[in-house]
């Protein structure tokens, strides 16, 4: 299931040969479908440590993406911070941001705006990322999952228990 979801997103947004020819409608359908598949997988695994948090994050992202035409909304201010001047960076309000998963929408036109890609990494000229509250919960859930399967290390014997 996870592989199918990742392939859908990779073809629509990652693989250079297909992402440029994917129509916006097909890309939005791929994003919603892949998020739905990941949500089903997470639901079936919700009793595993971290998965319930990961599931909540996926629900949050799927809600905002579905409510805004199949893409993750991002405000013009956040895009300006990420990319610079609209004229030179090639983005427009109301349009998909390049070949990515985001659509540039003013805050007042965004449904469930508090779930959109509205948070930013600390200001750094070399590395800037915008992310959502759902992304934070997905990351925390994944960290919790990995932490729980790591095993304990017994200090004196050097053996994993």
Image (spheres, rainbow, N blue to C red):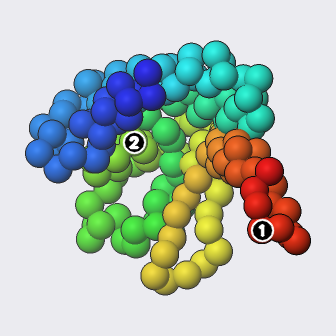
* Residue at the (68%, 28%) spot, across then down: 55
Q: Which class describes the residues within 10 Å of circle 2: few (<14), some (14-19), or many (20+)?
A: many
* Kind of element beneath mark 1: loop
Residue projecting furthest to the right = 156
Q: Which class describes the residues within 10 Å of circle 1: few (<14), some (14-19), or many (20+)?
A: few
Percent across and percent down for residue 1 are 44, 21
Which of the labelled discs sits on residue 101, or is there none?
A: 2
Percent across and percent down for residue 124 are 55, 81
The number of callouts visible is 2
Residue projecting furthest to the front = 157
Measured in 3D between alpha carbons, the distance from the residue under mark 2 to the one under mark 1, in whole angstroms, is 45 Å
Establish if 158 lies above or below 101. Answer: below
Percent across and percent down for residue 26 are 26, 24
* Residue at the (16%, 44%) spot, across then down: 20
* Kind of element beneath mark 2: loop
* Residue at the (61%, 31%) spot, across then down: 58
Residue indicated by mark 1: 158
Answer yes or no: do the residues labelled 2 and 1 have beta carbons within 8 Å? no
């Amino acid at each position: 299931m996870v592989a199918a979801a990742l392939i859908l997103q990779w073809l629509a947004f990652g693989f250079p040969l297909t992402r440029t020819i994917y129509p916006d409608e097909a890309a939005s359908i791929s994003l919603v479908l892949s998020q739905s598949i990941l949500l089903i997988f997470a639901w079936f695994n919700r009793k595993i440590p971290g998965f319930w948090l990961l599931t909540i994050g996926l629900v949050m992202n799927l809600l905002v993406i579905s409510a805004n035409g199949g893409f993750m909304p991002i405000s013009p201010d956040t895009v300006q911070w990420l990319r610079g001047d609209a004229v030179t960076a090639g983005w427009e309000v109301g349009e998909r941001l390049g070949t990515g998963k985001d659509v540039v929408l003013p805050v007042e036109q965004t449904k469930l705006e508090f779930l959109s890609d509205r948070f930013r990494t600390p200001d750094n000229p070399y590395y800037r990322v915008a992310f959502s509250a759902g992304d934070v919960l997905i990351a925390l859930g994944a960290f919790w999952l990995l932490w729980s399967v790591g095993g304990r290390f017994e200090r004196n014997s050097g053996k994993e228990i």
